[in-house]
Image: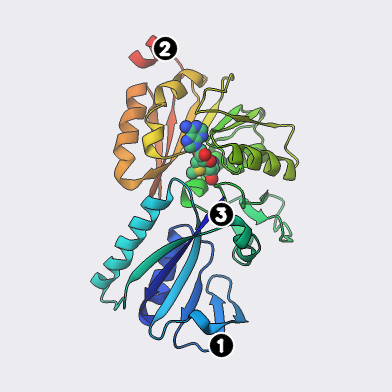
Amino acid sequence: MKWAEISVHTSTEAVEAVSNLLYEAGASGVVIEDSREPDLEHDTRFGELYELDRADYPAEGAIVKAYLPVNSFLPETVNELKNEISNLVSYGLDIGPNSVTQSEVDEEDWSTAWKDYYHPVKISKRFTIVPTWEDYERLSTDELIIELDPGMAFGTGTHPTTVMCLQALEKTVCEGDEVVDIGTGSGVLSIGAALLGAGRITALDLDEVAVESARQNAELNGLAGQIDVRHGNLLDAYDGRPDIAVANILAEVIVTFTDDAYRTLKPGGLFITSGIIAQKKDEVKDALAASGFSIEEVMVMEDWTAIIARKPEAGGTDAEILS
Ligand SMILES: C[S@@+](CC[C@H](N)C(=O)[O-])C[C@H]1O[C@@H](n2cnc3c(N)ncnc32)[C@H](O)[C@@H]1O
């Protein structure tokens, strides 16, 4: 998988605000090259300081760099980021040269460097994501640890769209539930569902790299026997009847299969959707309602929305009667 290095040349005054926007965009750490700071590079989230080569430092202002995975969300995320950085002016901040550049970094170059950025992150009441190379001691018996090597597919676990899905699963999974995870990426949601006590879990993805990554991560978490990872488009390769379907895919994709999800779910089953940029929220809600779902909860994190929708127990709408 490829990574994008997002590099923002800004004023020294705007470094903190720009760093926060990069975190909100999904970065797990930032590197600041500040013209005022002669010898040290620091990662503001983890407070690490180390000596660096200043060759690329700007003569004025500061460069804030972060790494984001190259995936279908990236163009939208970068556009949003540019708008938000430009908007900082309306809060009275000088944003200096305000140039945002993007370059691709190969997995090979990045494979060792990124380990400086990913550390254990507690992302919900119960879940902590722990990169495979980190030692981590469970803080309480209630804590659920997802071990991940996020190098291979989308799903470091820290993107707001993923965090909301894990939080939604935390609220809804019951012991023994059958779960289908559509667009599994690194397998993070399937692993989360298994740790919450789900029974049969099927993880589906169109991308062979994701399928391989999900299989490896399931194995890493000792769940290879429980998570059946399959290659295929949306629900095509699925033959079960789930209590819960979860899909963290773009809004444009979700609206194409709300009818299929409805038909596939057990009566009373839940459809958790995420990856919905704020402007597309109503489009997805309308598609869900038209398929017969009732909306139980709309979750919002930064610019993203996730929706928990339920198929009625019995009776239902025309869409159900027709299916
Ligand atoms: C945003 S990632 C989500 C990964 C992971 N579930 C998470 O929550 O972090 C979306 C995933 O959906 C997959 N995907 C996109 N379109 C798909 C389709 N039509 N059928 C199956 N998977 C799809 C992508 O390959 C990618 O792995």
- Mark 2 CB lies closer than 8 A to ligand 1: no
Distance from Cα at disc 1 to Cα at disc 2: 66 Å
Question: In terms of sequence position, does the residue under pointer 1 or pointer 2 come before the other?
Answer: 1
Distance from Cα at disc 3 to Cα at disc 1: 33 Å
Q: Marks 1 and 2: which is nearer the front? A: 1
- State which quadrant residue 218 falls in: top right
Question: Mark number for residue 123?
Answer: 3
Question: In terms of sequence position, does the residue under pointer 3 or pointer 1 come before the other?
Answer: 1
Q: Give percent across and percent down for residue 55.
A: 52, 82
Residue for badge 1: 39
**How many residues crowd around disc 3 within 10 Å: few (fewer than 14), some, or many (20 or more)?**
some
Q: Is residue 297 visible?
A: yes
Amino acid type, label 3: Ile
Instruction: Identify the image quadrant of the C terminus.
Output: top left
Q: Is residue 317 visible?
A: no
Q: In the structure shown, which secondary structural element does the residue marked by tag 3 occupy?
A: loop
Q: Marks 3 and 1: which is nearer the front? A: 1
Question: Mark number for residue 323?
Answer: 2
